[in-house]
């Protein structure tokens, strides 16, 4: 159920009407605290325009830890960026204007959906994910830094000529070029999943894939850029979860934007490869990316910072990135014209020239993923490297909704 906090009777009545049947109104934040103590199943708290902003923010900040399944919705007479930023920082799930009663109804429905998903996730038996493969999303909010190059070569490295089953998914839905880089001639694209939405299962999703090489298949982006508008986060989530059932690794290439499908991919991921190049604009977008991921309570131990063209002498060094982002570098990939030359030959550099410094850096990253150890382990000798199955058990079950995650630090 939903509880509304509002002192003004007319406003309270309007908010109560929009929040749906069974909604109760209380006059103050203290009354809300008492109400919540008695009712552990409430899924939304609507803080009306008469509630003081800093008190609302302070309460939301506490509730996101003590009651993560409760969605706090803030209603303001006017919403500006300062209010939005403060609300986002405190973990308030939605901010709506007082006159936007439809927006309020939608926010309540959204809180209900998140609450239901979180309760279902916490009821899930231990080890439920252990049979599934790992999902690695390659992202940068800045374009042209090498996401597709890294995603495709990483996928081929993980597949290791058929040793593991790997699928690459192109979520750059408008301008994806995975099929060009891999020289594929696909019969199907992710757009074909739209008409299958209600009957998707692992076999249906597999029928949309195009084979590249031993162990590596691809789910490519639509041919028509406007098909993007018909593919939402919900559909992408379903597809990714089904792929995890059939593959050891699913590698996701992304557009340079925080759109709905990218957030869904983050939500499903075990690891995020955050790519940057040695320029201030890339550093700025990485900084915004890690701050946003932090606000979304995404676990920091899953972020892998990769510097591409890392040997360029341009005044910024990889260590500047480590210091500013407070993240260790997981891989440094040198610049080489052979990367573009390989693409122009229709080959992946890790397959064409496995000993090339670019290939070595990407294959080492893949090896780190396939032998990932819990944080306390410091060394791995070849003799005690875990099998892919042990690896899956160690990294795959770290999933959870971005909005659903508990605060980790
Ligand atoms: N290490 C490298 N050395 C030299 N060229 C590189 C390197 N990495 C990527 N490139 C080249 O940079 C260009 C952009 O790379 P890529 O398409 O992988 O970037 P992207 O981040 O996927 O771009 P977009 O945001 O447009 O999807 C390509 O021509 C690629 O060949
Ligand atoms: Mg790309």
Image: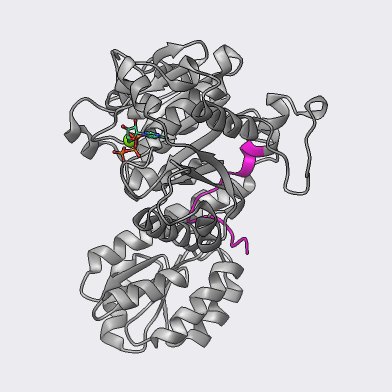
Q: Position of residue 21 (x, y in %)?
A: 36, 65
* Residue found at x 31% / y 44%: 143
* Residue found at x 37% / y 72%: 85
Instruction: Specify whether residue 399 is painted magenta.
Output: yes
- Side (left or right) of 9 relative to 348: left
Q: Is residue 247 visible?
A: no
- Side (left or right) of 81 relative to 71: left
Instruction: Specify whether residue 225 is painted magenta.
Output: no
Q: Residue furthest top?
A: 214
- Side (left or right) of 310 relative to 227: right
- Side (left or right) of 102 relative to 371: left
In which quadrant is the C terminus drawn? Answer: bottom right
Task: Please tell me whether the stretch drawn in magenta is mainly helix, strand or loop.
Answer: loop
* Front one among 77 and 14: 77
Q: Position of residue 16 (x, y in %)?
A: 33, 73
Q: Residue furthest right?
A: 383
Q: Quadrant of residue 184?
A: top left
Q: Position of residue 310 (x, y in %)?
A: 47, 44
Q: Is residue 46 above or below residue 301?
A: below
Q: Is residue 206 above or below residue 400?
A: above
Q: In this picture, which residue range is highlighted in magenta?
A: 395-409
* Residue found at x 24% / y 68%: 101
* Residue found at x 49% / y 21%: 350
């Amino acid at each position: 159920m939903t509880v509304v906090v509002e002192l003004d009777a007319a406003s309270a009545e309007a908010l109560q009407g929009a929040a749906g049947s069974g909604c109760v109104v209380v006059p103050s934040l203290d009354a809300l605290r008492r109400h919540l103590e008695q009712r552990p199943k409430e899924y939304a708290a609507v803080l009306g325009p008469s509630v003081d902003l800093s008190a609302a923010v302070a309460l939301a900040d506490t509730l996101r830890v003590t009651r993560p399944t409760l969605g706090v919705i803030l209603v303001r007479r006017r919403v500006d960026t300062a209010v939005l930023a403060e609300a986002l920082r405190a973990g308030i799930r939605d901010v709506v204007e007082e006159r936007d009663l439809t927006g309020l109804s939608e926010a309540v429905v959204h809180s209900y959906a998140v609450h239901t998903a979180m309760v279902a996730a916490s009821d899930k038996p231990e080890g439920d994910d252990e049979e599934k493969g790992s999902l690695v999303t390659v992202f940068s909010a800045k374009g042209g830094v090498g996401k597709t190059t890294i995603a495709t070569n990483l996928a081929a490295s993980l597949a290791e000529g058929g040793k593991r089953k790997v699928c690459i998914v192109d979520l750059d839905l408008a301008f994806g070029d995975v099929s060009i880089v891999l020289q594929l001639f696909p019969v199907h694209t992710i757009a074909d999943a739209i008409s299958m939405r209600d009957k998707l299962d692992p076999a249906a999703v597999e029928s949309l894939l195009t084979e590249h090489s031993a162990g590596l298949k691809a789910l490519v982006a639509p041919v028509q850029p406007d098909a993007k508008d018909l593919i939402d986060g919900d559909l992408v989530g379903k597809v990714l979860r089904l792929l995890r059932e059939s593959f050891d690794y699913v590698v996701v290439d992304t557009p340079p934007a925080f759109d709905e499908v990218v957030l869904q991919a983050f939500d499903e991921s075990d690891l995020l490869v955050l790519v940057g190049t040695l320029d201030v604009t890339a550093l700025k977008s990485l900084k915004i990316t890690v701050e946003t991921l932090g606000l979304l309570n995404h676990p920091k131990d899953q972020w892998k910072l990769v510097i591409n063209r890392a040997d360029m002498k341009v005044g910024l060094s990889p260590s500047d990135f480590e210091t500013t982002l407070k993240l260790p570098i997981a891989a440094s990939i040198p610049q080489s014209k052979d990367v573009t030359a390989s693409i122009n030959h229709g080959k992946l550099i890790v397959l064409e020239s496995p000993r090339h410094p670019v290939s070595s850096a990407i294959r080492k990253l893949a090896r780190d993923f396939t032998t990932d150890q819990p944080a306390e382990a410091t060394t791995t000798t070849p003799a005690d490297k875990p099998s892919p199955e042990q690896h899956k058990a160690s990294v795959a079950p770290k999933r959870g909704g971005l909005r659903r995650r508990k605060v980790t630090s």
